[in-house]
Image (cartoon, rainbow, N blue to C red):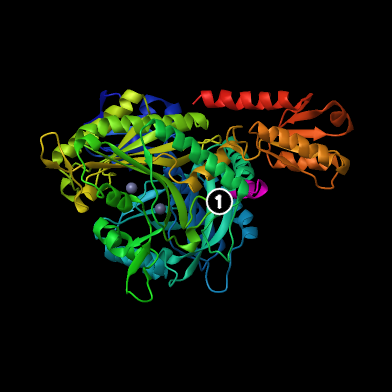
Amino acid sequence: MIKITFPDGSVREYEKGTTALQIAESISPRLAQDVLAAGINGETWDLSRPIEEDATLKLYKWEDEEGKHTFWHSSAHLLAEALQELYPDIQFGIGPAIENGFYYDVDPGKGVTIKDADLAIVEKKMQELAAKKESLLRQTISKTAALKLFGDRHETYKTELISELADGTITTYTQGAFTDLCRGPHLPDTSSIKAIKLMSVAGAYWRGDEKRPQLTRIYGITFPKKKLLDDYLVLLEEAKKRDHRKIGKEMELFTFSQNVGQGLPLWLPKGTQLRLKLEDFLKKIQREYGYQQVMSPHIGSKSLYVTSGHYAKYGKDSFQPIHTPEEGEEFLLKPMNCPHHCEMYKAFPRSYKDLPLRLAEFGTVYRYEQSGELHGLTRVRGFTQDDAHIFCTPDQVKSEFIKVMEIIHIIFRALNFTDFEAQISLRDPADKEKYIGSEENWQRAEREIIEVCEETGIKAKIELGEAAFYGPKLDFMVKDALGRRWQLGTIQVDYNLPERFELEYIGSDNQRHRPVMIHRAPFGSMERFVAVLIEHTAGKFPLWLVPDQAVILPISERFNDYAESVAKELKKHDIRVIIDDRNEKIGRKIRDNELKKIPYLLIVGEHEQEKNEISVRKQGEGDAGSMKITNFAELLNNEVEKQMNQW
Ligand SMILES: [Zn+2]
Ligand SMILES: [Zn+2]
């Protein structure tokens, strides 16, 4: 008999060789139906794999990442099986599960192409095969046998992968006539795959290398219930409507130009207005928290980044150095602001009385990204971090952390990110050598980060081995209105840069000490944050933040002068207002400006001019009646004030 320990700590005995599926059946038939994979001693296993020794057991369902992952990975195999039937000369690359679904990279064979239009047939074949309830059988195989098996089938991509594996670790999975080289885990059989949707076809270089053959990548997603697929497709439609690239264009926030260069966003007047509002908002909070604003140039001497260690680590994969024509100097586009701030720290001798020193900069940095990786504002080559570096004593790390967390809370509250969580990244306890900084400082900082999360009541999960080599960190993930998760801000403790830059302060003991450095960026970057904010709000920004709070719509050209005088009056009350004086019908003007998500539409015509009033329409709510200009200004400013009081 073997002992199985359940997540609640209870222990039950089973016969040696029992499978997780049999254990689930012994608990309830319903559970056995829902369960997709098993966690055996922390490793994800097939439900049908015999358990030979005492173990801890977790049963994963659809709701668990591990469950979904197993489901989608098995679906990738199902896709491959279907393709093999339809395209006899096909060769397979890799077919992993991804965040939403799965893909398979394939080489369809000489002269054969697979297009979007072909997907419906493949989908149908998958459905047919899934209904057959084929078991996915795991087999351990020697390297020689694996090379022969796939070699005989002329699977050159698979044999390349096998040649890199160690003998004794190789497994295959077979369902029906399809066998794949695979580590697993997988579903017991294909019958739980009830709803199938193949999404798209794309090109992908074998192993991501543009010098290797280009394969065909087929993306798909599957679900255990049809309803889940329907919901997903609705969500996808909604996500498309909220795409920040689309809304950014409609609202005239930003643009890209091939003449300027890929991945280099151009902030248009309205986007700049929005961004400056966000910057002012954060600057105001930071002033209250004792930060000082600084500025540094966009390039820095290469030697600066040699000192910081960034050059050794990222130099080859970055923009290459800029050379001066005469002096033989070398500069790098600034990839991060930290080294500049270290030099500011060093500008004067520092004493413990100067600490914490909090230097903040909206610093624009440049990082090379492959052109294929660029995406709207979320993956760019030049971006502005809402950066700050806090230089403090080891004693101050905890209280500084608490203050940064408070700032992050204020930001999330002001922008309606009600659902967020954090990830605490700590050292790998088994490999302490690879981290720099004293054991004492690490232990203390790690403990304090955990305490801070507990004390501030933030949901945080701990990941061992995820810390940077220079210190532990805390990253924030928000859930947007569609339930998608985005990584935003970060707080990182750093023992490395103070060492490399030989930063010092004189302690109360009159001795020299090393300060600790905390890097933090609550937004992450202005570009990414604005992108997430657009997709979260669908462009309906809170009134305090929105670039144009109101637009005046004259019914005809005759009222353009009156519109001008209304605008002048409103601007006196600090209201951000524009006029749409195009020679268009009023209905058209209303529709266009609603699309631009301007919160208030102010219509002016004969009647309004006579009474010195405006007719107010609120976005999404319609007619709000006519009122005096000053009354409207008061109404709007009260609304803004109310929002700002909620911070
Ligand atoms: Zn696989
Ligand atoms: Zn930094």
Q: Which residue is mark 1?
A: 126
Is residue 497 covered in magenta? no
**Which residues, given as a range, are shown in magenta?**
245-252
The residue sitting at 60% across, 27% down in the picture is 640
Q: Which SS type dominates the magenta stretch?
A: helix
The residue sitting at 53% across, 59% down in the picture is 83
The residue sitting at 51% across, 61% down in the picture is 84
In the picture, which quadrant includes the N terminus?
top left
Horizontal and vertical percent for residue 398?
26, 31
Q: Residues within 10 Å of mark 1 (few under 14, many from 20)?
A: many
Residue 519, quarter of the rendered image: top left
Judging from the image, what secondary structure is the residue with disc 1 in?
A: helix
Q: Is residue 62 among the parts visible in the rendering? A: no
Q: Is residue 268 among the parts visible in the rendering? A: yes
Identity, as a three-letter code, of the amino acid under mark 1: Met
99 and 9: which one is in front? 99
Horizontal and vertical percent for residue 263?
51, 59
215 and 258: which one is in front? 258
343 and 73: which one is in front? 343
Residue 55, quarter of the rendered image: top left
